[in-house]
Amino acid sequence: MDIRQLFSGAQLNQTVQVRGWVRTFRANRFMALNDGSCLANMQCVVDFDQTPEEVLAEINTGAAVEVLGTLVPSQGKGQKFEIQVDSLRILGTSNPDEYPIQPKKHSLEFLREKAHLRVRTSTFAAVMRVRAALSFAVHQYFAEHGFYQVHTPIITGSDAEGAGEMFRVTTLTAKSAADEIDFFGKETNLTVSGQLEAETYAMGLGKVYTFGPTFRAENSNTSRHLAEFWMIEPEVAFNNLDDNMDLAEDFIKSVLAYILEHCQEDLTFLDQRFAEEEAKKPQLERSPMGLMERLRFVTENEFIRISYTEAIDILRNSKPNKKKKFSYPIEGWGADLQSEHERYLVEKHFTSPVILYDYPAEIKAFYMRMNEDGKTVRAMDVLFPGVGEMVGGSQREERLDKLVARMRAMDIDEEELWWYLDLRRFGTAEHAGFGLGFERLVLYATGMTNIRDVIPYPRTPLNAAF
Ligand code: 4AD
Ligand code: MG
């Protein structure tokens, strides 16, 4: 049995066996063991008279041990059970002078350098368990709502977002002969989105979603950008933008409700950590809610929905605080919003998740449906406090002539996307979808502040260690 099972279902005075890693060993007697199954350590009381000295000397933080003993009510505070050790075996030693994860608070920056060991800390283990639970909740939500998962290609010839921030995939090298043909006989890249392929499947299976890695070579060294991140992209035939907003809102609420129900121990721990971190900030910058509180707030309240044009009006008449203006002034209708503007809207003005829709066509991708005004497209972004853009989506342009015109205007290769245009030739219909950046969801759910701390091995500019 793992420690989580022991805490939840084991009989007292049973003989039990546990294997895990030593977190602390005090007074040659109290060994806190963790096996990763849950946050809590199992306190194991070692009989030092019966334990050979060379074994005692090897019970160090980080060592792997196997314990056989009796489960008894705990003497100590804060836990129900402990194990009275009958026998103990060292499975793998850990030299205390070399093991970097000591039983003290390490900085997140230090732990990023030790990403292969950081999951042995309470914080990272809790974050990664919540991440796994969210991933499960994502699949469960779609399965229960009649969606089929599609596996879209990782290597692709098309730039779905038309932003050109792609990683080239090639077998050619500097030594290749000038006439050598590349592996695929054409230029290929790592995908920036599975959307275009997902659209083709939605126009056959009706409701589909992808959940896979995506890659962007944008040089944004921020706490919210990764070069490799996981994206969830549902796509639904016969849906319009309102349906799409409803889906995004219901989906996010549902997966957050799932972890509130199933990850209580980890979230309680992360909530405490969040409170400690917030307390270090100046009063004005502190989150008005605790972690659990803000998760419940999202699940219980409706998201605010306003158009881009309304948002611009609000921002024009706002000052982020008494003295300062925005560092990027609101340039007027048509300009893209900076993250400080988005943050102002969600964190100061509405203090709620906000869905902005109907953006100017110029700042959005080619595939979004043109509105009657000929200026705005049926786009939507879901903005979250502390995280900014969590979701980007749209109703797709289903009219062939309008789509082609837009592609020409934006210099998008029609030849390359012939198959995408075919969808508009054969049985075209309204359809819509969105992309949710999974790490941004995990950021919000765990109260962590840097996206590098919610994925096991972050890839960012100049960093692909591990
Ligand atoms: O807004 P984006 O670029 O939209 C798309 O890719 C569409 N094809 C989605 C669709 O309609 N099917 O990206 C979607 C989301 C963003 O809202 C953000 O949460 C996340 O992906 N994202 C990133 N997350 C981490 N690091 C990055 N560099 C990200 N870029 C986008
Ligand atoms: Mg976007």
Image (cartoon, rainbow, N blue to C red):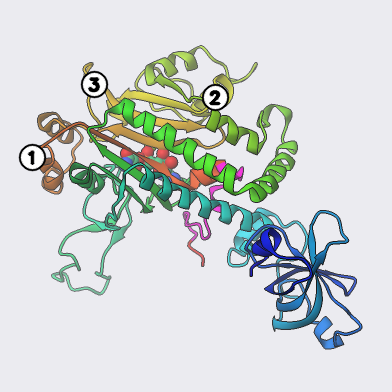
- Please give the range of residues in magenta: 445-463
Residue 159 place in picture, x, y as percent: 25, 47
Whether residue 154 is situated above or below residue 359 in the rendered picture: below
**Which quarter of the image is occupied by the N terminus?**
bottom right
Ligand 1 - quadrant of the structure image: top left
Q: What element carries label 2?
A: helix
Q: Look at the image and say whether residue 171 sits in the magenta stretch.
A: no
Sort mark 1 into few (<14), some (14-19) or many (20+) by Cα contacts within 10 Å. few
Q: Main secondary structure of the magenta part?
A: loop
Q: Name the residue under label 2.
A: 344
Q: Which of marks 3 and 2 is in front?
A: 3
Q: Is residue 268 left or right of residue 331?
A: right
- On the image, the x and y values in percent for residue 162 come to 26, 42
Q: Earlier in the sequence, mark 1 or mark 3?
A: 3
Identified by mark 3, the residue type is Asn
Residue 362: tell me if it is visible: yes
Label 3, residues with CA under 10 Å away: few <14, some 14-19, many ≥20: some
Q: Which residue is drawn at 73% across and 65% down?
A: 11
Which secondary structure, mark 1?
A: loop
Mark 1 vs ligand 1: CB under 8 Å?
A: no
Residue to which mark 3 is pinned: 371
